[in-house]
Image (cartoon, helix red, strand yellow):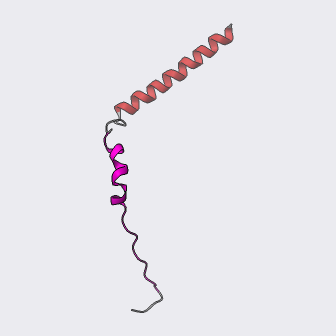
Amino acid sequence: MSVMYLLISISIAVAIGFFIAFVRAVRSGQYEDDYTPSVRMLFDDELKKPEPTTKNPNKQP
């Protein structure tokens, strides 16, 4: 029976730890922007810049 008390106390401590982490993430603004991630994939191709052409350093102009 003492093992049950130990497991319950450990699970409550873990749950409190996850709750504190969640509250800290919410207060720091982690979940503020819920619109941009859903639209970002639609405009992903426009954000990529074309790769610059590399010049041959050994070739004289």
Q: Give the quadrant of residue 55.
A: bottom left
Q: At x 49% / y 26%, what residue is drawn?
A: 18
Residue 47 is a magenta residue:
yes
Q: Residue 14: image x %, image y %? A: 54, 23
Name the one closer to the observer, 27 or 39: 39
Q: Residue 44: image x %, image y %? A: 37, 55
**Position of residue 1 in the picture relative to residue 26 (left or right):** right
Q: Give the quadrant of residue 27.
A: top left
**Position of residue 25 in the picture relative to residue 11 (left or right):** left
26 vs 6: above or below: below
Extreme top residue here?
1
Q: At x 37% / y 68%, what residue is drawn?
A: 50
Extreme bottom residue here?
60
Quarter of the image where the N terminus is located: top right
Q: Residue 5: image x %, image y %? A: 62, 10
16 vs 37: above or below: above
Q: At x 54% / y 20%, what residue is drawn?
A: 13
Magenta stretch bounds: 35-57
Q: At x 35% / y 49%, what residue is drawn?
A: 40
Quarter of the image where the C terminus is located: bottom left
Q: Residue 42: image x %, image y %? A: 34, 51
Residue 27 is a magenta residue:
no
**Position of residue 6 in the picture relative to residue 14 (left or right):** right
12 vs 57: above or below: above
